[in-house]
Image (tube, rainbow, N blue to C red):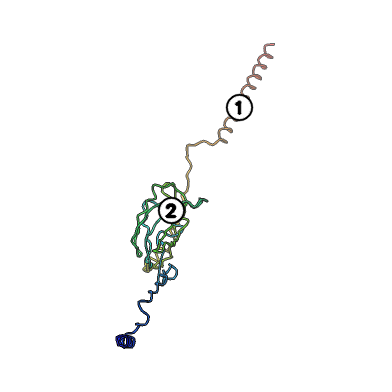
Amino acid sequence: MFRLHNLFLFAILALTTPGFMTGARQEEPTPPGPVSTLSATETPGSAVQIISPKEGQALQGSIPVVVDTTIANFQGVELTFGYMDDPTETWFWIYQGLQPVTGTMLVLWDTSTLTDGDYKLRLQVTFLDGSQRSVTVENLRVRNYTPIETNTPAPPTATPLMATSTPTVSAPAAVQATAPAPTPEPVLERGNPLSVSRESVLSSAGLGILTVVGLFALGLVYQAARTLRRK
């Protein structure tokens, strides 16, 4: 009788209690799947860029470095610089931070402590999964102590044309401007009445010489005549 009673209770429990036949066995929870992390290139609207300075720009003194690091899964940012002609690709630290920047100045870069030359600037962003993404601006010409050859070309700007006015000349002024200048009358040169020409001097000298010679000849004739008379 006791056995039938137990069988009867067992049947009732089997019909009214779900999972009674499985005993104490329970299903283990399913482990969660791997967490996917979007990379920089897979994030829509992401941006990692150096807005300023521009490639090829000449730099002097302290230069504001304007960047944009608005990107998903951002963890940190680092700004470094290097020499353009360095084959070892050595980078020197400028700034390191943990806050993203959206199109504003990240740091003020003092180039006066550098030797004049050509440099490159690198912005490197680290993500939560440990991956990194970097952008580089090359051919930055530091010219603190040497003349600047040419600066970064700027877009051409329209130059307004200035209006020119032509002065109006009145009739009397125009006639006066075109009238010929009066011709000066010729001035007659008058000689000095007391001046003696070269020809007059020579003529007088010749006449005097002839007179002296004539007188001398007459004296000789006279002297010869007296001598003849005495004899």
Disc 1 residue type?
Ile
In the rendered image, which quarter is residue 9 located in? bottom left
Secondary structure of the residue carrying tag 1 is: helix
Residue at horizontal 38%, vertical 53%? 94
**Residue at the spot of label 1:** 209
Residue 19 at what x, y percent from top left? 35, 82
In the rendered image, which quarter is residue 231 located in? top right
Disc 2 residue type?
Phe
Whether residue 187 sits left or right of residue 173 in the image: it is right
- In the depicted structure, whether residue 61 falls above or below residue 36: above
Q: Nearer the viewer, residue 147 or 93?
A: 93
Secondary structure of the residue carrying tag 2 is: strand
Around disc 1, counting alpha carbons within 10 Å, would you say few (fewer than 14), some (14 to 19), or many (20 or more)? few
Q: Nearer the viewer, residue 128 or 107?
A: 128
Whether residue 87 sits left or right of residue 62 in the image: it is right
Residue 182 at what x, y percent from top left? 43, 58
Residue 164 in sight here? no
- In the depicted structure, whether residue 225 falls above or below residue 148: above
Residue at horizontal 37%, vertical 62%? 75
First-in-chain label (1 vs 2): 2
Q: How many marks?
A: 2
Residue 202 at what x, y percent from top left? 58, 32
- In the depicted structure, whether residue 73 falls above or below residue 122: below
CA separation in Å, label 1 and label 2: 113 Å
Quick one: which residue is furthest to the top in this view?
231
Residue 100 image label? none
Whether residue 141 sits left or right of residue 214 in the image: it is left
**Residue at the spot of label 2:** 81
